[in-house]
Image: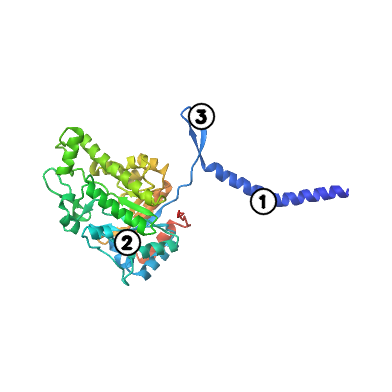
Amino acid sequence: MKSTFFVQNWRRKLIKYLFPLLILISFITVLLVDSFTPAFTEGGRFSAIAQLPRQEIRGVWMTNNDFDTLKNRDKVQEAMNQLRRLNFNTIYPVVWNSGYVMYPSATAQRAGIQPFVLRGSDGHDILADLINQAHHKGLLAIPWFEFGFMAPPTSELALNYPDWFTQKRDGSQTSISAAGEVMWLNPFYPQVQQFITNLVLEVVTQYDADGIQFDDHMSLPREFGYDRYTTALYTQETNNNPPANAEDPEWVKWRADKITAFMVQLNQAVKQRKPQAIFSVAPNYYDFAYKFHLQDWLSWIRQNIVDELIVQIYRPNLQSFIANISRPEIQESQQTIPTGVGIMTGLRNNPVPIQQIRSQVRAAQERGLGVIFFYYESLWNYAPEPLNERQAAFENFFPSPALRARVE
């Protein structure tokens, strides 16, 4: 009887201590099962492919309009504290705008281009301080190559290197953009490609940046490409002159493929310097990007050179916004990389009501998309609502943290 008592007592203790462990094992097993995605081999056999969870992007662009904040260490600290408190996880600070860099650049200096913004209010390196303070708060910092191939005709770049710029068939060299009148660097010209590559590699190697981002200006309006160099290259490769119709499908594809080839080379250069750097792109929706700006970003994704996609959808109409974020190419992107949508929070002369922002954030989140706001200052300033009401709304967008892991 005594031995039976000890056995029963031992069993009770065993169950008492093992039961929580069994529960934990079961929970972990469920998580592991959920992390595998069913797939079929070419022969139709079932296999399980490990699929890492894709991190949710919660970001904001920091533009030239935010310079009063960016140049001041204390204001940067306040901004990073605020973003962290609101459960943001990524910032995208501008480093290339209007033909000028926003950091001390040997590449720009060799080209005779003066830095637009060199130092902060106490003589510090603005970009280094911003990245450091972002990391201190657990935020990723991905410098944003805002102007891409675009530059104003009055910039030193345009004045010093006229041969680097392309033109329309009628010989004109400018177009009207959201930034005003601009010229376009020739993305097919070797010197231009090298200049852009050098600038990008400077940022990636000289700073503790988590990656680099290119947006809808890393492209070329379809009316351009009729300069002497490009027409000669096209004739050499196709034995034909460029079509008079800028919308000709073959002419569009040839130029788009050339830009894609450059982006592949640029990605390889970045990854060679910093293998874990995030190669981020933020284009317009695909039909517009390809047909009007020769930007075949879907091909970039399929060629595995994009680490995160953010599609700019600046639409006040909710139905139009939802239609654009529901497009198949965005769904395709979601299967492989973190994917988000750019949401307009306002401009100085065009405030956006918080209800519009709220409905768009909700629509994006319901579809598993991250959200990135344009731009920092307009999150709570230039708004039709009182500051406290505006900030209260942003507190509800991300009620819990979603930190993105840094890979050193």
Residue hosting label 1: 20
Assign a secondary structure to mark 3.
Answer: loop
Residue hosting label 3: 45
**Which one is earlier in the sequence, the residue at label 1 or at label 2?**
1
Residue 174, given in percent of the width and then of the height, sits at: 16, 51
Which one is nearer the viewer's eye here, 232 or 4? 232
Q: Quadrant of residue 203?
A: bottom left
Is residue 336 in sight in this rendering? Answer: yes
Q: Residue at x 28, y 62 (%)?
A: 65
Q: Residue furthest right?
A: 1
Q: CA distance from mark 1 to mark 3?
A: 37 Å
Q: Residue furthest bottom?
A: 122
Q: Nearer the viewer, mark 1 or mark 3?
A: 3
Q: Residue at x 41, y 43 (%)?
A: 334
304 displayed left or right of 247:
right
Placement of 85 over or under 32, stated as above or below: below
Q: Nearer the viewer, mark 3 or mark 2?
A: 3
Q: Amino acid at mark 2?
A: Ser
Assign a secondary structure to mark 2.
Answer: helix
Placement of 44 over or under 376, stated as above or below: above
